Amino acid sequence: MCRARKNKGFTNVRIVLILLMVFIHNNLSPQSDINTLKAVAIEKIALFITWPPGSLSNQEFTIGILGDNPITETLKQIYLEKKIKDLRVNIVEIKDIESITSSCQLLFIPKIKMAELNKLLKHTSNKPILTISDTKGFAEAGCMINFYVYENKLRFELNQKGMDEAGFKIDYRLLKVSKIINPVIE
């Protein structure tokens, strides 16, 4: 029976990996909603990341969105009933950097000026907050995950050093499907 459970668990992980690749690497068409693909990818990516100990202790998984961003409504619609890490998802609009707290497990960062990004990353550097953006150069600047479109497909970069320094653990399977920025050499 243990072996059957183990095989079932392995099969489930394989299915999730396949779904992750299908959703993220799906060809984008004019009818596709890029924000929907990003919103779904957030959940799939989170499956392969372990947050630092104690940072997921409350009853909900909070996604903060800095400023006014079109992805906000998409996230609210998708996560009405879906969960992340077996936690109910709470979508919060954040008006300014100073109001970001550790109760936010994930922060979506819109296109902002580099000086403002540096201020934001400094503010979140000691907090277990996974930072995600969709702006060229933000992963290199310290954002942990950055979405981009390449050959008409949604892809993502992963700042391995930034995530490692913040205490996040990354499953090797996520590393295999990511473009790695600042790799950690072991």
Image (spheres, rainbow, N blue to C red):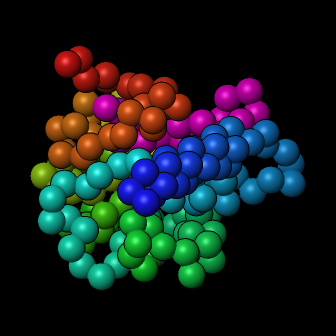
| Residue 46 image-quadrant placement | bottom left
Residue at 19% across, 54% down: 52
Whether 78 is drawn above or below 14: the answer is: below
Q: Which residues are magenta?
A: 143-160
User: Residue 11: x, y in percent?
Assistant: 56, 49
Asked whether 151 falls inside the magenta stretch, the response is yes
Residue at 26% across, 55% down: 51
| Residue 17 image-quadrant placement | top right
Whether 27 is drawn above or below 131: the answer is: above
Residue at 19% across, 45% down: 166
Q: Is residue 174 left or right of residue 59?
A: right
Q: Nearer the viewer, residue 37 or 48?
A: 48
Q: Looking at the image, which residue sits at the far front?
A: 1
Q: Quadrant of the C terminus?
A: top left
Whether 2 is drawn above or below 91: the answer is: above
Asked whether 30 falls inside the magenta stretch, the response is no
User: Residue 76: x, y in percent?
Assistant: 56, 76
Q: Nearer the viewer, residue 99 or 105?
A: 105
Q: Is residue 79 left or right of residue 125?
A: right
Q: Quadrant of the N terminus?
A: bottom left
Residue at 36% across, 40% down: 171
Q: Main secondary structure of the magenta part?
A: strand
